[in-house]
């Protein structure tokens, strides 16, 4: 019998089951470019009185892209004589995936995405915030951790300066904004207070912010890292279970040189590279709309090609992105229908699909065994 036999049960002929499987194989999910059967995405399927209903559970969020494959699938299935109507239900079902060796996934966080850059000023925090919002808008439960202890900017970019609350005196509730769960040292200090701390205190603070925050069942936690390859990045590699890292760069050589160092660092500590994002790829004139590559061309793309990692996309240097971040209204939320917001969503699709189609981690599915002396 076919692959869907367990879903159908015994109330359908083998011939019809095979035909339905063939139609599922011909329907391609646009981000992963895999067919629905290969993705093992069919979680429920019923045929009653020539009315077929099925549930498609995708392992990554892409809610805005559901209509196209649904239309294609219905067209494929409507051609079968035994079927008069088709109902397709969609859901996002993100699971935990493998992390670096020696690290154990955290209880309430399925996947951690580290967003890094070799140097400052490349727009990494802006990218982190809009990526997190795009993932959330596409159907995932998302949090963002501001790991830049010396220069926390996430509270400003998300327009919130609330103080985290604690119900038990041991853990903090994350601050929420735009549907995101957020934690930053910026919530705990005054805006003009400098963090005059040495490395060990900084890394301890990062670990506490992560593990002493009562995250509420996250599909993804985006960690906005400070620039460089120092103490914070090393702590991340050794103590924090990371699903994968994203490298943000600009096209210019000064940025690419440092981006290579960041990429190689993650390779050495065996954290998978999800891909490279090229920020400030072109400048868009606010008066005439002319687009020009003022920092060089295709630097990020060439970097990805050289190191055989995915190129997740490029983003423009646009005045609106900066203005909206300063106002606490990131582009993906402030202008959801804009071309720039769509670029962020495309990057979110590629990032989550890269995670969703890799090896799953089953560690948190096993029960905890406690041996007691009786």
Image: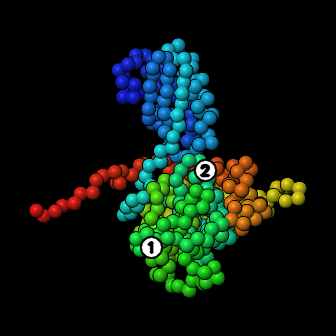
Residue placed most toward the observer, 221 or 19 = 221
Query: Which percent across, then down, holds residue 128?
Result: 61, 61
Q: Looking at the picture, does residue 9 appear above or below residue 330?
A: above
At mark 2, the secondary structure is helix
> Which corner quadrant of the image does residue 3 belong to?
top left
Please state if 5 lies on the left or on the right of 111 as rendered: left
Residue at 46% x, 81% y: name it.
200
**Can you say which quadrant of the picture contains the N terminus?**
top left
> How many numbered callouts?
2
Quadrant (top left, top right, bottom left, bottom right) of the C terminus: bottom left
Relative to 74, does residue 218 appear above or below in the rendering? below
Where's residue 249, x and y in %? 65, 63
Q: Residue 304, relative to residue 211: is it above or below?
A: above
Name the disc covering residue 208, or none. Answer: 1
Of all residues shown, which one is farthest toward the top? Answer: 81
Looking at the image, which residue sits at the far front?
Answer: 167
Residue 269 quadrant: bottom left
Residue 217's mark?
none
Label 2 crowding class (10 Å Cα cut-off): few <14, some 14-19, many 20+?
Answer: many
Q: Residue furthest right?
A: 288
Mark 1 element type: helix
Write the residue at 64% across / 50% down: 345
> Eyeballing the image, is 80 above or below 156?
above
* Residue at the image point whose x is 52% and y is 53% from the top: 141
Task: Name the residue tied to disc 2.
Answer: 137
Q: Residues within 10 Å of mark 1 (few under 14, many from 20)?
A: few
- Left or right relative to 298: residue 113: left
Residue 71 visible in the displayed image: yes
Q: Is residue 369 left or right of residue 351?
A: left
Which residue corresponds to the image point at 38% horizontal and 19% vertical from the top-left? 11
């Amino acid at each position: 019998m076919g692959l869907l036999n367990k879903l159908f049960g015994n109330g359908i002929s083998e011939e019809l089951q095979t035909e339905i499987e063939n139609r599922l194989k011909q329907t391609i999910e646009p981000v992963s470019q895999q067919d629905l059967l290969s993705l093992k995405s069919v979680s429920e399927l019923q045929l009653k009185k020539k009315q077929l209903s099925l549930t498609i559970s995708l392992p990554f969020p892409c809610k805005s892209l559901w209509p196209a494959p649904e239309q294609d699938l219905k067209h494929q299935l409507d051609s079968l004589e035994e079927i008069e109507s088709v109902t397709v239900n969609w859901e996002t079902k993100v699971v935990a995936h493998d992390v670096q060796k020696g690290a154990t996934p955290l209880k309430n966080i399925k996947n951690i995405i580290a967003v890094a850059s070799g140097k400052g000023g490349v727009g990494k925090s802006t990218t982190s915030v809009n990526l997190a919002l795009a993932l959330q808008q596409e159907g995932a439960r998302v949090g963002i951790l501001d790991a830049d202890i010396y220069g926390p900017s996430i509270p400003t970019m998300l327009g919130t300066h609330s103080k985290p609350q604690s119900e038990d005196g041991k853990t903090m509730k994350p601050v929420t904004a735009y549907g995101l769960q957020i934690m930053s040292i910026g919530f705990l200090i005054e805006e003009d207070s400098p963090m005059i701390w040495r490395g060990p205190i900084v890394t301890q603070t990062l670990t506490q912010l992560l593990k002493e925050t009562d995250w509420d069942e996250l599909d993804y936690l985006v960690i906005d890292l400070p620039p460089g390859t120092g103490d914070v990045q090393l702590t991340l590699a050794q103590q924090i279970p990371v699903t994968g890292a994203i490298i943000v760069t600009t096209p210019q050589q000064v940025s690419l040189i440092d981006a290579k160092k960041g990429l190689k660092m993650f390779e050495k500590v065996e954290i998978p590279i999800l891909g490279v994002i090229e920020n400030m790829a072109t400048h868009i004139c606010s008066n005439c709309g002319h687009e020009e590559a003022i920092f060089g061309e295709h630097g990020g793309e060439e970097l990805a090609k050289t190191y055989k990692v995915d190129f997740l996309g490029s983003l423009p240097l646009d005045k609106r992105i900066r203005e909206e971040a300063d106002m606490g209204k990131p582009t993906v939320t402030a202008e959801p229908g804009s071309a720039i917001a769509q670029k962020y969503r495309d990057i979110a699709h590629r990032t989550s699909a890269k995670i969703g189609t890799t090896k799953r981690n089953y560690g948190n599915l096993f029960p905890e065994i406690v041996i007691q002396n009786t």
